Image: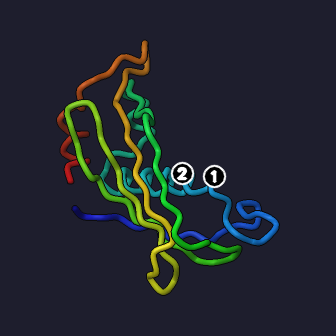
Amino acid sequence: MKSFAVSLRVRYAETDQMGVAHHAVYPVWFEQARSELARARGVPYASWEQRGYFLVVTEVRCRYLKPARYDQLVTVEVAVASLKSRAVVFSYHVRDERGELLAEGETHHVLVSRQGGRPQTFPPDLAEALRP
């Protein structure tokens, strides 16, 4: 399973009074990494919408191991864990500058039509771009 990594700095607005990244920002970081993975594989998410597809989130899981802190540089690694005809699962690992694991998670998605929201089969080019 080949991963793709995005580095980001923990912003002040993402932290609580103790300077620790709030648990709610991790799914946002996951989305950023997932979007960059799609762009790197030649199928930016905006093009999915232009073609009439949405990739809806059906489940989010995150296990917090150590805190990310204000101004810390973190790396979010994303990989396609599984791909089915209408669904995809992405896995994530959030690491600090030393490579220490701070959090890990998964998001589950279903491809739906923009018009009507009905589940759709991945077109061959999108499936190929996401293939683990």
Gap in angstroms between the C-alphas marked 1 and 2? 6 Å
Disc sitting over residue 24 in the figure:
1
Quarter of the image for residue 72 reads bottom right
Which of the two residues, 43 or 31, is positioned nearer the viewer here?
Answer: 31
- In this image, 123 relative to 10: left or right? left
- Local secondary structure at mark 1: loop
Q: In the image, residue 131 lies at what x, y percent?
A: 20, 49
Q: Is residue 124 left or right of residue 6?
A: left
Q: Foreground residue, 45 or 94?
A: 94
* 13 or 128, nearer to the observer: 13
> Which residue is farthest top?
116
Q: Is residue 117 above or below residue 122?
A: above
On the image, the x and y values in percent for residue 55 come to: 40, 34
How far across and how far down the image is residue 77, in percent? 40, 65
Provide residue 99's location: percent of width, then percent of height: 44, 82
Say if 58 sits above or below 30 in the image.
above
Mark 2 residue type: Pro
Position of residue 125 relative to residue 74, above or below, is above
Q: Is residue 78 above or below residue 55?
A: below
In front of the other: 126 or 70: 70
**Circle 2 — which element?**
helix
Residue found 42% across the figure and 42% down from its top: 45
State the image quarter where residue 19 is shown: bottom right
Q: Which residue is label 2 attached to?
A: 27
**Callouts 1 and 2 close, C-beta under 8 Å:** yes
Label annotation for residue 78 = none
